[in-house]
Amino acid sequence: MNKKKDEKDVLIVRDEQTGEISVVSSLSRDGTPKTKPAKLENSPDFLHFDRGGDVLDNFFTNFFRQYKEPSRFGFYRLAADKVDALLDVMKDLLKDPEANKEVLAAHKIDTSEYEKKVQQEKNGQEPENINNQKQEKEMEQKQEQPAQTQAEGRRNGYQPLDESKINWPDMEKKWGISREALQKSGDLDRMLNYGKSNLIAAQPTFDGEKYDMAMRFSLKTQQDGSITIKPHFIRMEPNLNVEFRGYTFTDEDKKALRTTGNLGHIAEVANLETGEMVPSYISIDRKTNEILTYPASKLHLRDKIGTTPLTKEEQDILKTGAPLPNKEVELANGRKFTVTLQVNADQKGIEFVPGTSRSLEKTQEQTQAPASESRQQKADGEEKKKRLDWTLEDGSPKPITKWKSREFDDQQKQDYLDGKVIKLENMTDKEGQPCTLYVQFNKEKGRPYSSTTPPEPGKVLGPSNESKTQVAVNNEGKTNEETKGVKEPLQKGQVKPKDEKQKAQQEQANGEDTKPAKKQKKGGPKL
């Protein structure tokens, strides 16, 4: 019985006129749905319904009361723990629901009784119970349950926060953000459903003065029932050198948090309201550097990632908070890759640790491609990833405090945000060769660039002509025809061998290129 109560579904909605398919992401105050496109990348936003609860009953009753054309929509349930594996399959089946009627029968929700109930209400009749047998069983269960469980049942399962209890004018005055802006960006739905917003360019007021800064927000219910907004400020770095809620980070803890964003094991931290020490996972919010916790007792671990099963041993490793590296994962769309899995307190579940994913298909393609092409593909992929990490929602630069381990002073931090050039002397490239770097945020590209020479007026900052070869070969893994045989790192301005030793290396490399290929033996592999 308890297992059934813990099972959850997501609700798939099909517009019968347009064929559009979406998934319920949240509920409005009147119980009507808000949806997200039925794509796997949106799965963290899908709303989970208790399979044995009354939320669906209340939802459909309100739906038929509120919507002008309720019969236009078809509803299908899908087990929440099967979303990754079956969502794409369901979308294909729903392209022609009539032809796939038999297969979809197990998922389709019969809403005729809800429609009948609402129609009876409109006609002034006493509505019949939708499922008397279900209600009788629930009454029997409630008689056997303790008072606390009965109280939880009366809450009708999941309910979003009531936005009418938020003082919107006060919020806008204090933080410089409006309800309309939050709703337009989609952040309001996330916050009303107990999540955090993305980074927002806010204008908080302190001591009568407004400040421009980026931060995240969440909502918190007070003891009197009112709901206040909770800010999550950007920190230059997480403060790991002080005791955190009764727990002291070791050197290994600090290294793990700074490297992966996750502690890597369960730690006991104090509950801020009761003082009780609670075994919890600890992670860093990668957008704000805030230290976050999630009770280990609340972790719901599925036995699959995508369509890939997790063994009992792998699940046990993940439950301890430790990483599970090099796990080969296949998604429902057939995409395969290897990745490190780990519990993340911010996501309240298992995450793909950023920077650890490698596509198996791309890896195979790169082993067959020329070395220079593979290096270029890798560089392009890293470039694309970096662009996503440098800007706020409005395209303005995120604050940074250093470049290549060189700390910025306060003026340099501000100059960077203003798009000005920062000069860093006595720097070295990746091979340890001395150079001077100029750093500047490029608004058009949405990322910073560095160069060994200052930019010319009106031109995009990039490596200077005299340093392009050095940077390309030493730092980007590219090949220069004139120096491909040189084994030492190139120096500033170098485009040819600098001495007799390097000339000999280059001549040897050129000689190998001109040698005829060895004849293959009969039956041997073809090149």
Image (cartoon, rainbow, N blue to C red):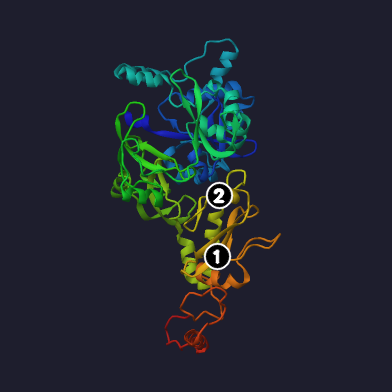
- Check the image and report above or below for 212 versus 172: below
Query: Where is mark 1, residue-wise?
Result: 436
The numbered mark at residue 413 is 2
Q: Amino acid at mark 2?
A: Lys
Q: Quadrant of the N terminus?
A: top left
- Is label 2 in a helix, a strand or a loop? helix
Q: Nearer the viewer, residue 249 or 485?
A: 249
- Is label 1 in a helix, a strand or a loop? strand
Q: Residues within 10 Å of mark 2 (few under 14, many from 20)?
A: some
The answer to whether the residue labelled 1 contacts the one labelled 2, judged by CB atoms less than 8 Å apart, is: no
In the image, taking residue 433 as reference, residue 262 lies left or right, namely left
Q: Position of residue 463 (x, y in %)?
A: 60, 66
In the image, taking residue 250 as reference, residue 527 lies left or right, namely right
- Check the image and report above or below for 206 versus 374: above
Whether residue 407 appears in this view of the structure is yes
- Check the image and report above or below for 485 versus 195: below
Q: Position of residue 348 (x, y in %)?
A: 41, 39
Whether residue 197 appears in this view of the structure is no
Q: Position of residue 349 (x, y in %)?
A: 40, 41
> Which residue is at the far right?
458
In the image, taking residue 520 as reference, residue 459 lies left or right, namely right
- Residue drawn 54% across and 46% down? 92
Q: Position of residue 255 (x, y in %)?
A: 36, 51
Q: Nearer the viewer, residue 42 or 259?
A: 259
Q: Which tag, 1 or 2, sits closer to the chain's start?
A: 2
The numbered mark at residue 301 is none
Q: Amino acid at mark 1?
A: Thr
Q: CA distance from mark 1 to mark 2?
A: 18 Å
Q: Which quarter of the figure has residue 82? A: top left
Q: Residues within 10 Å of mark 1 (few under 14, many from 20)?
A: some
